Image: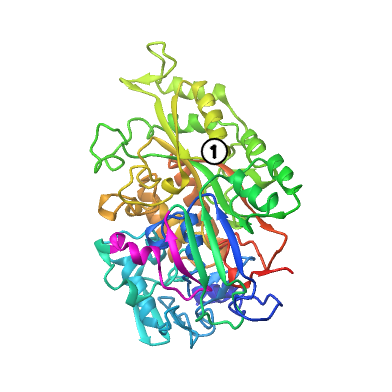
Amino acid sequence: MKLKLALMGAAASLASVPMAMADGHAGERGRDGNVSIIYWQAPSILNPFLSGGTKDIEAASMIIEPLARYNETGALVPWLASEIPTTENGGVSEDLTTITWKITPGIKWADGTPFTSADVKFTADYCMHPEGGCAQLTKFEGVTSVEALDDMTVKVTFDKPTPFPYGPFVGGESPIIQAAQFANCTGAAASSCSTENFNPIGTGPFKVVEFKPNDVITMEANDMYREEGKPAFASVTFKGGGDATAAGRAVMETGEFDYAWNLQLAPDVIANMEKGGKGTPVAGFGPLVERIMLNQTNPSADLSAEDRSVIRPHPFLGDPAVYKAMSMAIDRSLLVEIGYGKAGKVTCNWVPAPDAFNSTSMTCDKQDIAGANKLLEDAGWVDSNGDGSRDKDGVELSVLYQSSTNAVRQDFQALIKQWWSEIGITTELRNIDASVFFGGDAASPDTFQKFYADVEMYANTFNGTDPQSYLANGLCDKAPSPATQWQGENISRFCNEEFDALHAKLAETAGLEARAEIGKQLNDIIVQNGGMIPLVHRGRLSAHANSLGGVILNVWDSEIWNSADWYRIK
């Protein structure tokens, strides 16, 4: 009963609202011509199940959709479903082991065929296929079966009471793919289905006309879209590549584009761009964290491609003295100042938001070079040969530090390299084109999933306001490897029995207060045991043309979640 009441309480924040918000400008579908979007990290695939990259997930969100998603306030709203299942309305079972979704009747795929429960079940089978590699597998944690009870009803069964059953089919990271299109693309064949992965048939407001990976996506309005008069735009030009500076200028100064994503630029640069008068920056704080991931496995080039970042342990990053000293040497306040200004905050946490889940057990706002040096010295790391690099038992403290190509990230790399040199750690810097780094190509040696480096820096976030699935990215069995076609979100290959057991407890715990307490403990375990070094809690900063109406920045789901509502201001 306590579990039931807790879920009913949580459901009070779930809104039953129309699937998209009216723009107040009724008219014919496609009436406003073309809208141009620029993501300087170019999408490389339109199947979120084969990529953990935000740019791929968000581009795909204009085409393929989930049963429910989170709105700009973080409230869960129905999308392809007619309502949010709860214990109160009978959609979640009394014992919290099942959730039953009712699909809104009449929805069609862009090819005119009906959208049914068979597509939902197929999507689950596709992601959970034992021979495949699914980047979003954590959404299906604990799921034992997904059944199509009838054409409009889907039942998900969990292996135990699950107070938060909104993982599968919720948010931009877990959309529905068409069973007919992907029928021959399951298991090991998934990554080889280029046509399907580049041109998914969807239920969203737009459909793909042409996709050039790492370059441009041309879309057109979906004539089968369920809402009359939407989308307002007849076509979309979704350009990828370049850099954040060029993207910001293209919207705010030259007016060449209507929307620019993720303007990871210094605050003074944004202010100067805004003076161009063509566009407006928009920002909001969600759970996005810039951090350094610490490889728990051995990335040595002396190992085979199959063994790199699989064989344990790392030569020295498992030593608490080393990873704690690396963190102590960093001046996070300076990083915030030069990189983000008001759009950044110092954080010690992997999950800094929502506030209920933000741990207060650690402090890291003060740089301590002297303390870091003492920590290493006391642990036996000394510069025995005078080359500036500490060593111990024949192992040198020398790291390859990689990140994606971006001005702010390269500034961070240069500063951190200097700080680490002051504590006797030699650092080689490497930056990789963001489209490749976040691309998820199983054949590429340069993806963040393969992690052929000692440390790597990036940021990502999660959909919604409950981090259960996101925290599952620290589970031992979620590490990318050749067996999973290098898919998986446990990028550092962190593995801790206490963490795994505590996450299992979170999955069966009801009540926000109790869940938040466990969530904070999980956060602390992975940070304090060297899985990562959090740096900056980042605001999401993008920009839209002054002539583009209907934009509502969403930090809890796909940023462009409501593209169906966009319109041209005359």
Vertical side of 521 occupied by 184: above or below: below
Measuring from the top left, give residue 302's x and y in whole percent: 25, 31
Colour scheme of the picture: rainbow
Q: Which amino acid is tagged 1?
A: Arg
State yes or no: residue 263 in magenta: no
Residue drawn 64% across and 44% down?
A: 345
Measuring from the top left, give residue 324's x and y in whole percent: 48, 32
Measuring from the top left, give residue 410's x and y in whole percent: 53, 35
**Quick one: SS at disc 1?**
helix
Q: Quadrant of residue 361?
A: top right
In-front residue for pair 320/354: 354
Q: In the rendered image, is residue 454 in sight? A: yes
Residue furthest to the top in view is 386
Residue drawn 57% across and 67% down?
A: 561
The number of numbered badges drawn on the structure is: 1
Residue drawn 62% across and 74% down?
A: 232
Vertical side of 377 occupied by 76: above or below: below
Vertical side of 288 occupied by 269: above or below: above
Badge 1 crowding class, 10 Å Cα cut-off, few under 14, some 14 to 19, many 20 or more, is: many
Vertical side of 322 occupied by 103: above or below: below
In-front residue for pair 158/39: 39
- In the displayed structure image, the side of residue 200 where residue 481 appears, left or right: left
Measuring from the top left, give residue 469's x and y in whole percent: 45, 60
Which residue is under mark 1?
409
Start-end of magenta stretch: 190-213
Residue drawn 56% across and 77% down?
A: 8
State yes or no: residue 199 in magenta: yes
